[in-house]
Structure formats: structure tokens, C-alpha cells
Image (tube, helix red, strand yellow):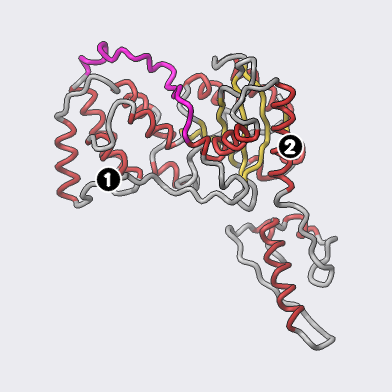
Amino acid sequence: MFIHKNVAQMEYSQRRWYVDDTAKTNIYNKNLYAVIVKDDNSFNQLLSFGYLFDQSECSYKLFLHQLHNILNYGPEIIVCDRSIAQYNALKHVFPHSKLFFCRIHIERSLTKYFKNDHIIMKLFHLTMNMKLNEDDLIETWKSIVMKNIKNLEEDSDDESTYHDDNESSDEENDEHLFEPDTGDIINSADEPDTSHDNIQQMMEEAKGIHINKGLMCIIDLIEHKENWIPSECIKYGMYRDFTTNRVEGFFGHLKKIINHSQVPLYLLTDNIYALANTMFNNIIGIDLPDEIIDKNVPHFNLLTEFSKKVLKSQYNVLNNNVICDDTHYCISCQIRNVNPKVAWP
């Protein structure tokens, strides 16, 4: 297990973690596990990575216990997939962290059993886009389960792991690895009529449908609704950000570097460190002129790199257009959040 010391020392590493694992990266067929964090500028940073013995709860716990013991802190929020082994390990090691299931993995799980134009998928998309009350969705799903409860024994697929074994297509989508993430909410490719009457009609139709597969998936989502419903996401500021796209994009970029081959662990580790350092160095090193700020002021260390970039660019614009000798600078910088700890006196 490895930790990026510089990233671990940053305050943003205590906020949100995006965790996932991937296969087919090394000659020993050990899954690579990674923890990505979002910095103050919404850039991805690699906090930690390691190699799992397997995908059992014990393996996840071993990695996470080591990570927690070294960091001596846990995050406020963790975004993960629906692997029950990983979920249980995260809950055990970080009991005070709020866990969210990746919305893309949820959709992936549902589409294993229901096509995009299936009424269950339509209602799911409407709910995730805030066009259907989440309580109505849950009650409709409960009605479906009760009507089809006799089919549970016929639902032969083992859903006890809640794990998607397919390689993620999002791992190839790495072109924005070094850019701020702006992932949007789920949008149905073929969004149905969202009028009140039509939605009510769809819910009534859904209560009468017969399904043989996917019941365990629906039951699990009902039982873990606090880990994905929109109201919880909004409550924690995660409505547009509860996916593992960040870590999957990291995996995709890494696999391109190693040409999608399985390499020895030492070589894979070297490449991961190089990529992590590139990600970290990509946004640091903004040097502000002494004329506009005193670097000894405590507030200086709380400025984000984004703020420094804006301040420096405004300074350059002013400096290039001022002809008088006596200049007093008044520069503003837009901020994303009002934080009293970083407010200037």
C-alpha cells in the first residue's frame, strides 16, 4: 500500500474520496485499488493505491486499515461502487464517513436486467433528474417487489456481491484527467413525457409488471436508498458528483501508459508514481508577485492555486496598462464557497 505524502497533507484529502479497483494491470492478476481525491480546484489527485489479494471483505479491510493507521484521519464522504465486500469494509474502517454508491454503477446494475426503455429505467432516470419524487419511486419499487416476491427464488444470478465484473468503459474516458471535473447528472437517452399525468400512469403500470430477474438488485437499492437518492446527495453537496469517474479516468490513463498490457508490479508502481506526481505538479508552483500580497500573512497559505492564477493574471493585466509610478492594487477573485476561515480581515 502506497500513499502520496504531499496529497495526504492537504486539507482537501479529508473531504471526499473516490475509490475503485481495476483488473488486468499486472502479471500477477492482482487488482489495483486506488483512492482519488478532489483538490480545491476540482482537479484529481491520487491519495493512495495498492494491490489487493482478492476482492474479499478481508482484503479491502486490510488495505483500508493500513491507510487509516497511517493517515490518522478519514474522509467526510466516500464514493464507491456496489461491491458489498468493499461497502462493508468501508463502513467498518470509516464508520463516520458518509458513503455514496456511484450512480453510473447503479445504472449499470439495473441495465443488466432492464433495457433503457423499460418502465423501471424510465422511472429511475426521472427520479435522478429530480422530475419524480424519490419516495414515489421507492414505493413503486416496493409494490413491484411484493407483486413478484414469488419469483425471488427464480432470480438465480448471485447478487450477494452487488459487483459489476465487466471492465468499465469509463476507464477509457481519461481525456479530462488533468482538467477540473464537470460531470453532470444522469440523463436518459430517451427521456419520457414528464407531465404529471404521464408519470402517474407509468407508476401505475409499473406496479402491475411481472419480472423474473433483477429483483435482488431492486431490493438492495431500496435497502440502501440513503446511499444514492437525490435528497441525500443534495444534503451532502454530491448531486453532480457521486460517481467514480475520477478514479476510473485515472485507471484509463494509466492503462494507456502501459499500453493496456500486464506488467511487473515494480514497473506498474513506477508508472503510477510518475502519473500521480504529474497530476500533483500540474497545478502547483504559482508564484505571486510581492507587490500584491505578503507571503508571511497566515491567509496566504489558504489560497487555492485557482485563486492564485486569477490574482496573478489580473495583476499582469493591470501592470501592463498602468503608466504612473505610484500604484495601489485592488484585485478581486471569485470564490466557490464562503469559508470564514479564509476570509480576509
Please tell me whether residue 150 belongs to the stretch shown in magenta. Answer: yes
Q: Quadrant of the C terminus?
A: bottom right
Image vertical order of residue 263 relative to residue 153, above or below: below
| Main secondary-structure element of the magenta-colored stretch | loop
Q: In the image, which disc is placed on residue 268?
A: none
Q: Position of residue 71 (x, y in %)?
A: 72, 31
Horizontal relation, residue 219 to residue 326: left or right: left
Which residue position holds label 2?
274
Asked if labels 1 and 2 touch by Cβ distance under 8 angstroms, the answer is no
Horizontal relation, residue 20 to residue 217: left or right: right
Which residue position holds label 1?
190
- Residue at 14%, 29% in the rendered image: 208
Element on which disc 1 rests: loop
Q: Residues within 10 Å of mark 1 (few under 14, many from 20)?
A: few
Element on which disc 2 rests: helix
Q: Position of residue 139 (x, y in %)?
A: 25, 34
Q: Name the residue nearer the viewer: 218 or 108.
A: 108
Q: Name the residue nearer the viewer: 63 or 309.
A: 309
- Residue at 58%, 51% in the rendered image: 180
